[in-house]
Amino acid sequence: MNNNIPEDEEEWISKTQRKLDCDNMQKLGEALITLKISELNEFNLPSILHDALEQGHKIHQRGALKRHRQYIGKIMREVDAEDIQKQYDNFRHKDDLNNAHFKRLEKWRDRILAEGDGALNDLINEYPQLDRQHIRQLIRKAHKEQEINKPPAAYRQIFKYLRDLSES
């Protein structure tokens, strides 16, 4: 029996795996250092890590920055990196969610302009607080602008109204 391996094999982690984990933590630290300070403030980071990341923004020499990134990697090994990784992933995907929401509102706008009352009734079912008279006026304006090749001001107003409605 090998004396280097503990009896409880679930706790044993290979040297290769430990190196991969360290590399991943350092990469996460490098990703965090690229964020603006205002974005870093949104994260719930230990103060030592937050301070090190802020200092990293002030370093411009290549060798010094490399050493500082290694220092951040060392700090990352001492803190709860899983929690920080989750926060970073949520931060990165926040834009994806906003884009999906905007695409959905654009589809509603295009649908009510193309289909008319049927689509408008479906929209009212989803957003009961919608001002039916106001949206109908915007739809008429958008159709008129389209007929005479004017800039699509009402088209944009419909989107803005739908965005405001979805946020309330």
Image (cartoon, helix red, strand yellow):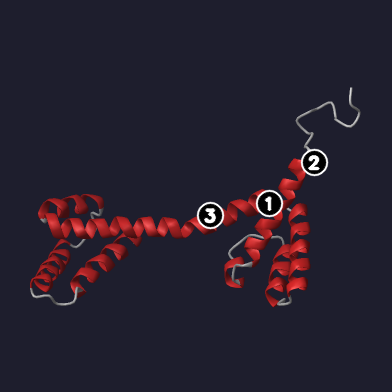
Q: Residues within 10 Å of mark 3 (few under 14, many from 20)?
A: few
Q: Quadrant of residue 69?
A: bottom right
**Quadrant including the C terminus:** bottom left
Of helix, strand and loop, which one carries label 3? helix
Q: Residue 9: image x %, image y %? A: 78, 28
Front-most of 27 and 35?
27
Amino acid carrying mark 1 in the image: Asn
Q: What is the spatial separation of the Cα atoms under label 2 and label 3, in whole angstroms?
A: 30 Å
Q: Quadrant of residue 139?
A: bottom left
Q: Amino acid at mark 3?
A: Asn
Q: Give the residue number, with chain letter if any, for mark 2.
A: 15
Q: Is residue 49 above or below residue 147?
A: above
Q: Amino acid at mark 2?
A: Lys
Q: Is residue 13 left or right of residue 98?
A: right
The Cα atoms of the two marked residues, 3 and 1, are separated by: 17 Å
Measuring from the top left, give residue 135's x and y in whole percent: 17, 64
**What is the number of callouts on the image?**
3
Residue lying at 63% horizontally and 63% vertically, measured from the top left: 32
User: Badge 1 is on which residue?
Assistant: 24
Residue 126 location in percent, x, y? Answer: 25, 51
Q: Give the residue number, with chain letter if any, for mark 3.
A: 90
Viewer-side label of 2, 3: 2
Identity of the residue drawn at 25% across and 54% down: 127
Most extreme residue toward the front, as rendered? 62
Q: In the image, residue 35 lies at what x, y percent?
A: 60, 67
Name the residue at 74% across, 77% down.
Answer: 61
